Image (spheres, rainbow, N blue to C red):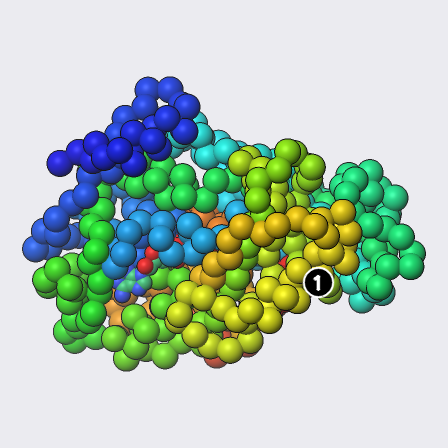
Amino acid sequence: MQNFSLLSLLRNAVSGHRDWKPFWRDAAPRQSYDAVIVGGGGHGLATAYYLAKNHGLRNIAVLEKGWIGGGNTGRNTTIIRSNYLWNESGALYEHALKLWEGLNEDLNINLMFSQRGVLNLAHNLGDIREGVRRVEANKLNGIDAEWLTPEEVKEFCPIIDISKTARYPVLGGTLQRRAGTARHDTVAWGYARAADALGVDIIQNCEVTGILREDGRVTGLRTTRGTIMTPKVGIVAAGHTSVLASMADIRLPLQSHPLQALVSEPVKPIHPCVVMSNAVHVYLSQSDKGELVVGAGIDAYNSYSQRGSFHIIEHQMAALIELFPVLSRMRMLRTWGGIVDVCPDASPIISKTPVRGLYINCGWGTGGFKATPGSGWVFAHTVATGEPHPLNAPFALDRFTSGALIDEHGAAAVAH
Ligand code: FAD
Ligand code: PYC
């Protein structure tokens, strides 16, 4: 049945794109599928889309316990960039960024992808060394990157305070000009609609509660809407992957933490780019609606509660005023939190598991939105062929036993 709700008409109105059609069918589960993706966030929906588009699978489903995009995909602050340190990460995130650059056309939807540039500030000698090293590493990997002096930072971002008497003076920063932002929920809707058009069943209000196995191989899933048989399962349930993996007796090296953000009342355009500061613990952009989008580091404790503690917001506001005194009387409109799953090396796991036919895509921590298209692309390859795509081979689960970690704490740019 097509979804002609008022909401979908409104979505159509905001998309302003050619040849608009209603969104996805709200499907009922069938008894069996060739492959099932657990988690209807951007990554899960992108995986389903590329399974259908790149690998020709049609009898597949995405199971979502709530509504699609209601997890981190619809809660994140939409920063997209590829300026990671190591070759493995650079290749994966740059693949994603290149896909973003053609995604409006591919999905036929206006994702409001805006390459307005992302600045990562340096406030001490350690920051400068990390930033300059990363700029050079990026250039060697063909990723656009520049080092800016404080004056150049000010030119790029006029509302920032670069005075030498500031408590955390701005000593320079890295700039990726091709980086930017996009509209988060439209990414989920766009992938859902495109996957639906290729025959994928998108099943909401369907929580996976058990993983069925026989002789070390997955055979199906127990869900709140009945048992579904399938020989292939891809888990992409950010923040909850260890809960799902434990249903197959797999223990993962993940910690679930709240990550918060907030927005101000809408104002006229005053902030043309994205600024992040790992040392001061805040980042800032302005949405197309005019709201200032402000993010912080993770809450230190583990939780599944989709909310964080107030002291993080207080710290975040203090840091904001430190860098942007001009915002001192700005009123804040709403705050929220999501649950992110953090890996010890701040890099994702995209991998086979000890259970045959069971694959995981998790551990994106504070930074998976930017990876959505690339993650879906390589995970679809892994699920379809049973083997990793060359881009996700280094991100396998066995790196935690081999020791071949990919430490991206510096480039994660959000305090862990
Ligand atoms: P989700 O969108 O969370 O989707 C997973 C889905 O799985 C959920 O919808 C959930 O309901 C479902 N699920 C869970 N358990 C089950 C079950 N048992 N059965 C069925 N379904 C289940 N990243 C960036 O790159 N840039 C940013 O600026 C950025 N900012 C962030 C700010 C905040 C406040 C937060 C919280 C995150 C931020 N991130 C950012 C991280 C980014 O949001 C995530 O890495 C990314 O969205 C993960 O996408 P996903 O599709 O894997 O997860
Ligand atoms: O990874 O760029 C990022 C990011 C920004 C805010 C949260 N994560």
The spot of residue 342 in percent (x, y) is 50, 69
Q: Nearer the viewer, residue 277 or 399?
A: 277
Instruction: Give the residue number, with chain letter if any, for mark 1.
Output: 318
Give the quarter of the image for residue 211: bottom left
Identified at 31% across, 57% down, the residue is: 39
When the figure is inspected, residue 324 is found, relative to residue 4, above or below; the finding is below
The number of callouts visible is 1
Identified at 12% across, 60% down, the residue is: 225
The spot of residue 237 in percent (x, y) is 35, 61
Identified at 85% across, 56% down, the residue is: 171
Q: Amino acid at mark 1?
A: Ala
Q: Nearer the viewer, residue 110 or 292?
A: 292
Q: Quadrant of the N terminus?
A: top left
State yes or no: Cβ of the residue under disc 1 lies below 8 Å from any atom of ligand 2. Answer: no
- Disc 1, SS: helix
Q: Nearer the viewer, residue 221 or 167?
A: 167
Identified at 40% across, 23% down, the residue is: 17
Judged left or right of residue 189, residue 288 is right
Ligand 1 in which quarter:
bottom left
Q: Quadrant of the C terminus?
A: bottom right
Q: Residue furthest right?
A: 164
Judged left or right of residue 122, residue 333 is left
Give the quarter of the image for residue 271: top right
When the figure is inspected, residue 261 is found, relative to residue 258, above or below; the finding is above
The spot of residue 111 in percent (x, y) is 46, 34
